[in-house]
Image: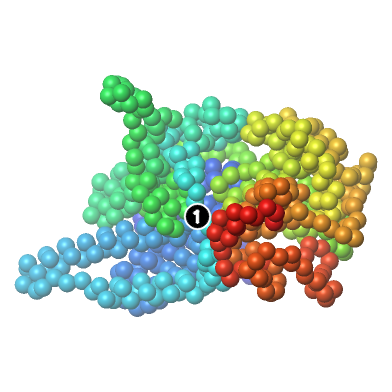
Amino acid sequence: MSQTRPDRFLKTCQVFSANPIRLAAFIGGAVYAFSASRAIFSALGHYDIVSTEFIPFFTLFFLKSLHEPGLKNPILAGVFATLSLLAEMIFGVFLLFLGLILISARMMQNRQSLEQKSLRFHVKASFDIPNLFAKMIVLTLTTMILWSPVMVPILQAFRQGNFDLAGWGESIKLSADVVGWFTSTALHPLWGSDWVTRLRQVQEGTAPFSDVNTVFLGYGILLMAFIGMITFWRHAKTWVIVAIIFAIFTLGPLLQINGTYLFPMDNLLHEQGISQDVTFPMPFMLLHYIPIFRANRVPIRFAVVLSLALAVLVGYGVYWLFSRKPDMASKPIMSIPMTTLLMFILLFDQLALPLPLTSAIVPDVYYQIGAEPEDFTLLQLPLGWRNSFGVFGVERTQIQYYQHIHQKPMLGGNISRSPDFKFDYYRNIPLFQAFAQTELPTHDPPVTSDTLIKAQTQAGDLMTLYNIKYVVIHAPIPHRKPYEDNFFHTRQLAYDLLPLNSEPIYMANGVAVYQVHQPPIPDVLRIDFGDWTSDPYRGQGWSQSEFMDGASVNWAIDSQAKFGKYPLQPDWQIFRATMPVSALHKGTNRLVMQFKHQAIPRQVLSAQTERI
């Protein structure tokens, strides 16, 4: 039975005629939900970092686990920890840090309370650590069991390849600036700037800060959090500590002030003959030396818990305001205007209007491609590969999103972590070098004539090897430079290098689909593993091509460079293997070599060896 309008109005009034605690919780939740950092992450397309709705629930049941008996709360905390990890694995680090701080605060609070009792009643102060430990075990086991379908494959992948952060990543660029804490974001309708222009400035290094200023704390929020801190210090000090620790972590490995992290300090080091300026290391730097924790290469993401801590402190401040005038909270005619005013004060400088949006409409051509029954691969322009550590070419994430409609394999795309080999494989192929260097000539060296000749020589074979049936060319996104300026050159390169039909087979809304003419596979396919032409055929476990005694060679450098289960002799030999037809399938067939012993060349080559 549906509610009438008067019923819905009365229901709303009940919310705003509640006690001060409920109003404080409502306003604190709004501060957490509509913080400026969430809007920036959303505009940047980092939807995993926006998916923080489960962290407050984890925190709630974690706190209840510390204060209440039983195992229900640890189990629920584990459930919400799992949901947080499914949204973004790095949230696990945040929850661990938050949990350790809350446990430490609880232990200190209990110790102080018991010591006071011992002074009054002459009892020995103690803390039920075994019970706390048992609850944490239950929480951890719940999380591991529920997350195991994802955790087990991740652990297997880490065991098979090195996914650790190489160097420092872009941790300095992706750090908060102290001045940025107090500077409105580029998305604010009054004090911001054009979003596309700001992104372009960041790319060119001319923006006010190294990044787009993700961590803006807000003046109203800081004021109300300060009120909550001083009025309820005994209860709020834990959240003050959480806010300070996570705020410091957002600053990254080096202190940045107004876009500067190198400070002359009145030529302090220059006078000592040292030709560099002073930097101020921050605690985030310590994480770099801790396995697993070092994988968090983006300091600004610590704002996720920082905003939660500020929201709790705001709740304390709001509760203090309403508790001073109980009538103001109990009467809707007073509580509604007061709540609206507080929301305006707290959230006005957090506004992100209009929030940049990306169209989720899939071009019609992909529905047509998806309707084709056979299995084949797509090559799409712009063409690029991206992981957390770098980009090769121009990667446009929308194109990967369209795959849920056409369901075909595709070259290029975005992945969080990948072994070095994955990028090196594509970087070594002249055709992909030519596209990447034409799409972004300022980021890569200009394409050479030798690369173009090799690319054209090998292009047809690659179309057959990857089973590419269509090349899909997307018009550039307006004002998305520098690719917008290089689009026509990139498209012409595709026309020049690839065996395409002269006219598109599908075309709609700025997307053109050209059919590829795949050369037939030769009856005798000879692959010289020491020649550049073999690069696309070699999987992981091989070294670079080289010449030795007049012959082209390539060394297997991994025991997983497999090649069936055929015995090899310790001496030099010509190895032949006949593959039964039943072992082959349509598309790419992988031949694998597996070695039980490895040795460097000088250990096995004699001085008289002239040819391999």
Q: Is residue 477 visible?
A: no
Q: Residue reaching furthest right?
A: 502
Compared with 442, 307 (above or below) is below
| Whether residue 517 can be seen here | yes
For image coordinates 91% across by 50% down, the residue present is 517
- Give me the residue at 53% from left, 56% from top: 163
From the top left corner, tell me how far across and down residue 312 is, in percent: 37, 53
Above or below for 496 versus 416: above
Left or right of residue 472, residue 93 in this image: left
- Residue 167 is left or right of residue 536, and the answer is left
**Horizontally, is 287 left or right of 583 in the view?**
left
Q: Name the quarter where the N terminus is drawn.
A: bottom right
Residue 155 rendering spot, x and y as whole percentages = 52, 67
The residue under label 1 is: 164
Q: Which residue shows up at 81% across the image and 63% down it?
A: 587
What residue is at 50 percent from the left and 62 percent from the top? 85
The quarter of the picture where the C terminus appears is bottom right
Secondary element under disc 1, as helix, strand or loop, is loop
Q: Nearer the viewer, residue 514 or 499?
A: 499
In the displayed orientation, state which residue is furthest to the front: 608
x then y, percent, for residue 536: 74, 52
Whole-percent x and y of residue 342?
Answer: 42, 43
